[in-house]
Image (cartoon, rainbow, N blue to C red):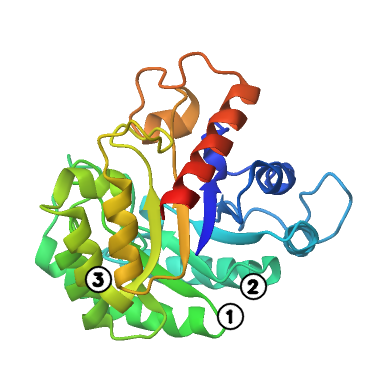
Amino acid sequence: MKYGIYYAYWEKEWGGNFLPYIKKCAELGFDALEVACGAFHLSENNTASGNANPFRELNAMAQYYGMKLTGGYGPRPEHNLASTDETMVKNAFAFYSDIFRKMELAGIDRIGGALYSYWPVDFSKKFDKHADTERSIKRMSQLADIASNHGITLCMETLNRFEGYMLNDHNECIKYVKAVNKPNVKVMLDTFHMNIEEDSLTEAIRDSGNLLGHFHIGEANRRCPYPQSRMNWTSIGNALREIGYNEYIVMEPFVRMGGQVGHDVSLWRDLSHGADDNQLDADAAYSVNYIRSII
């Protein structure tokens, strides 16, 4: 298995320069860095080093440090594949096509998130879960073919009821993935969301079996995993081994308030306890060593 962390652990805004985090995370003991792909469409000439292609630069630096890159995206409303607005959906396909091309250049072979809908959901707007899901399945099947041309796997993340409505637990996700019926469309589980929605975290893993394509971990309050946790990391690790899971285990901690990141994940108190970047680094290094020893 490959152990990673999401860059936004250190950041308050989505996007930005991911290059420094490759070296940092390699030195902290990680195998992979997860980056936000939602801003890839902005420019191919946004790099401080003068390299004309920042995506090739990401790839080269990741290879230099022996790191893997994975992608994440909580789709903006204008990229909602379940929308009734056909023009908006057409534009979403164009957006994803561009993103997939750039992911391939960066050496990123998978992207996870609420790709089937958008995030975070605006619950003040009406929605029809059944009809939205049917539209999403049809369009995801088409999107999967485009992603396949670039060697990319699409991972459908189940979200808790406060952030999404379409896929809230592993059963809904498995049903969705089977309906799409494409080899590069997989289930994605996240222990933070699972802790809210699942009857059993370990049974959700076992039920997902070989459909599980990506796995996010974090404490119930989204801190880095640690030994005194009320999450049973040993049992989670056992379940992953039972199904032969050998893909990415990516920490997605959110501990600092502020910015668009803090707003979108509803972080209204400082879970870092005033930690500076050096302390955040130390906490992440300790956590990955612990999880590696357990899982």
Residue under the image location 54 percent in, 52 percent down: 4
- Label 1: how many Cα within 10 Å (few below 14, some 14–19, many 20+): some
Q: Name the element at disc 3.
A: helix
Q: Is residue 184 above or below residue 4?
A: below
Is residue 17 toward the left or the right of residue 124 in the image?
right
How far apart, in angstroms, are the residues tagged by discs 3 and 1?
A: 25 Å
Give the labeled residue for mark 2: 104
Q: Residue 281: x, y in percent?
A: 61, 31
Q: Nearer the viewer, residue 65 or 154?
A: 65
Earlier in the chain: of badge 2 and badge 1, it is 2
Q: Residue 211: x, y in percent?
A: 31, 76
Is residue 234 toward the left or the right of residue 153 in the image?
left
Q: Amino acid at mark 3?
A: Ser
Whether the residues at callouts 3 and 1 have beta carbons within 8 Å, the answer is no
The picture quadrant where one finds residue 214 is: bottom left
- Label 3: how many Cα within 10 Å (few below 14, some 14–19, many 20+): many
Give the labeled residue for mark 3: 208
Is residue 44 toward the left or the right of residue 238 in the image?
right
Residue under the image location 37 percent in, 62 percent down: 115
Q: Name the element at disc 1.
A: loop
Examine the rendering and report whether any part of residue 125 can be seen: no
Whether the residues at callouts 2 and 1 have beta carbons within 8 Å, the answer is yes
Q: Nearer the viewer, residue 171 or 167?
A: 171
Whether the residues at callouts 3 and 2 have beta carbons within 8 Å, the answer is no
* Quarter the C terminus occupies: bottom left
Rendered image: mark on residue 150: 1
Earlier in the chain: of badge 3 and badge 2, it is 2
Earlier in the chain: of badge 3 and badge 1, it is 1
Q: Residue 248: x, y in percent?
A: 48, 62
Eye-nearest disc, 3 or 1? 3
- Label 2: how many Cα within 10 Å (few below 14, some 14–19, many 20+): some
Residue under the image location 47 percent in, 42 percent down: 290
